[in-house]
Image (cartoon, rainbow, N blue to C red):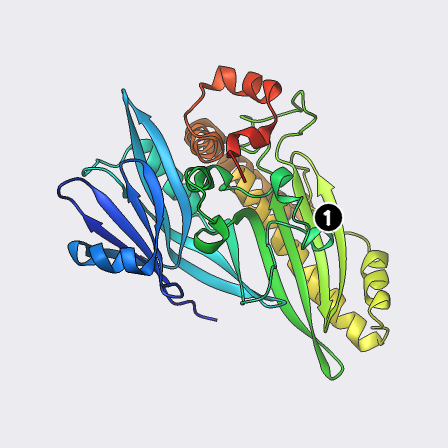
Amino acid sequence: MALSKGLRLLWKQEPGPSALLEARSRQDCLLLEAGTVAALTPEEKDAIKGQYEKLMDAFGCLGELQLKCGNARLHFLVLVTGCTSVGKILDAEVYKITATDFCPLQEETKEEERVTALKKILNSGMFYFSLPNAGSNFDLTVRAQKQGDNHYESGNSFFWNQLLHVPFKHYQVNCSDWLLKVICGVVDIRTVYASHKKAKACLISRISCERAGARFHIRGVNDDGHVSNFVETEQTIYLDDDVSSFVQIRGSVPLFWEQPGLQILLAQLESLGLNSKSIIERFVESYKVMWTLNGHNLSRVFTGSRALEGKHKVGKLKDGARSVSRTIQSNFFDAVKQEAIELLLMGDFFSEEYADKGKMLMDHTALLGPG
């Protein structure tokens, strides 16, 4: 389903840079000025809105990025300006981000290389968000077993733009009203007909933000037990009000991304009362394709090329070409990619040498401020 641009950013330069963020579905708005964020009532908004001009419309907002620049601090509002639907889960539409814009919240600022690199990462097609309908609390960053668990968010390892929410939380803005939560990974959603009913077959891989990064730059395990490039892959079937979810976890990148055994899928289908041979065959065929695409797409995230095949002469020739591509990727591009990932996850509050020490001294949720 096509999504309309529900946010509007308005701007004025004098007497000082100031922005208003409006939502089509709300009467109030947010005022972003001098490094602060304030929620304005409809009456307060109407009193000052005439001083502002429209800057742009957007599908959603990821939050605010703050960067050090000498002795000053730069502020950028990160807006989603392009996205495509990948399907619907329960009452929530799921979208892939295809374009973002970093709007400076100070006087005109030349876009830094760091911002350009981060924008490239966010626009790469590996970030997703969900938009639940009114009354739904579906959260794409959380697997089916944890949906509705309000205590899970503080320890959510798959919520990639947590840091961008911090400035809003600091000023007691309800982030769920204004900001999106995104995962990094792969989402595949397909409709499978089960007799006279329609089921949803979903395969979602969520990359953890605990020790994420480019291959060769992030390896091994840290003192908290987080392995590099930890991935949670959830194979889920939705049928009416019932759901069956199988979660597979793994760290680092294996040579081959393998799908779970057929017995797992059969057990899921049986739990939903789907025992017909023709229905089983439809699900098996769907998931075979989904797991293959999932492996290739995850491999692109980590290595810049499709997964190695390792079979037959043609496959080995392709593997050779992909290995060359990966060598070029790791030597010339991965360092920039790694810096962009760290900027998104940790900001530039800490130098790299102190980042791990800081995590050891305080719970990681301390960076997020008050809930």
Residue 368: x, y in percent? 52, 34
Looking at the image, the residue that sits furthest to the left is 14
Secondary structure category for the residue under label 1: loop
**Residue 335 versus residue 198: which sits nearer the camera?**
198
Judge whether 11 appears above or below 359 on screen.
Answer: below
Looking at the image, the residue that sits furthest to the bottom is 196
- Residue shown at the point (21%, 36%) measured from the top left: 109
Residue 245: x, y in percent? 75, 57
| 268 displayed left or right of 142 | right
Residue 137: x, y in percent? 60, 59
- Residue shown at the point (51%, 53%) measured from the top left: 128
**Residue 191 versus residue 44: which sits nearer the camera?**
44
Three-letter amino acid code of the residue under disc 1? Glu
Q: Quadrant of the C terminus?
A: top right
- Residue shown at the point (64%, 38%) measured from the top left: 155
Residue 191: x, y in percent? 64, 72
Query: Where on the picture, by quarter, is residue 4?
Result: bottom left
**Badge 1 density bin: few <14, some 14–19, many ≥20, Cα 10 Å:** few
